[in-house]
Image (spheres, rainbow, N blue to C red):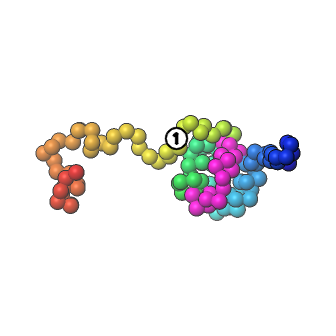
């Protein structure tokens, strides 16, 4: 802790991704039984994908107690690449307009919605 005048300024160190991975992830990801992906497989992913998985993806429950900085530290430890906070981590999401909205469907062919629900969008 650094004291400046009468105010206390707390300097915190950046989270240690290696330590965080060992304490929060390795118990499952380093298990020898498949289908768990170990650090080598996870390291081949993009750092933004790992942050997304920990915050809103398949590992969101396990990552819910981690701060954003801790999630980024784990991702950077695994991939060796910094997390680009400007780049949206929309893993598994399509970009652009859905095909049915592009006008490439002939109007004579009923949509699945109109056939099953009885109305069109």
Task: Give the image quarter of residue 59.
Answer: bottom right
In this view of the protein, which residue sits in the foreground, 7 or 94?
7
Residue 42, percent from left and from top? 63, 48
In this view of the protein, which residue sits in the foreground, 26 or 119?
119
With respect to residue 22, does 6 lie above or below?
A: above
From the viewer's perspective, is 72 left or right of 10? left
Residue 15, percent from left and from top? 74, 48
Q: Main secondary structure of the magenta part?
A: helix
With respect to residue 40, does 82 lie above or below?
A: above
Residue 3, percent from left and from top? 86, 45
Q: Residue at x 73, y 54 (%)?
A: 20
Q: Residue at x 15, y 43 (%)?
A: 107
Count of all numbered marks drawn on residues in the image: 1
Can residue 76 be seen in this snapshot?
A: yes
Task: Give the image quarter of residue 105.
Answer: top left
From the viewer's perspective, is 5 left or right of 39? right
Residue ID for mark 1: 88
Q: Residue at x 17, y 41 (%)?
A: 106
Task: Give the image quarter of residue 118.
Answer: bottom left
From the viewer's perspective, is 4 left or right of 25? right
Q: Residue at x 86, y 43 (%)?
A: 5
* Mark 1: secondary structure: loop
Query: Which span of residues is magenta-colored?
Result: 60-79
In this view of the protein, which residue sits in the foreground, 51 or 40?
51
Residue 6, percent from left and from top? 85, 46
Can residue 40 be seen in this snapshot?
A: no
Whether 39 is among the magenta residues is no
Classed neighbour count for the residue bearing mark 1: other residues with Cα under 10 Å, few (<14), some (14–19), many (≥20):
few
């Amino acid at each position: 802790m650094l004291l400046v005048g009468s105010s206390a300024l707390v300097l915190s160190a950046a989270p240690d991704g290696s330590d965080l991975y060992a304490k929060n992830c390795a118990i499952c990801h380093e298990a020898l039984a498949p289908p768990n992906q170990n650090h080598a497989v996870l390291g081949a992913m993009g750092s933004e994908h790992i942050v997304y998985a920990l915050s809103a993806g398949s590992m969101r429950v396990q990552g819910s107690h981690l701060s954003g900085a801790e999630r980024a530290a784990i991702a950077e430890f695994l991939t060796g690449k910094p997390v680009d906070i400007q780049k949206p981590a929309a893993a598994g999401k399509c970009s652009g307009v859905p095909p049915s909205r592009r006008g490439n469907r002939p109007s004579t062919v009923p949509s699945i919605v109109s056939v099953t629900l009885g109305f069109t969008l």
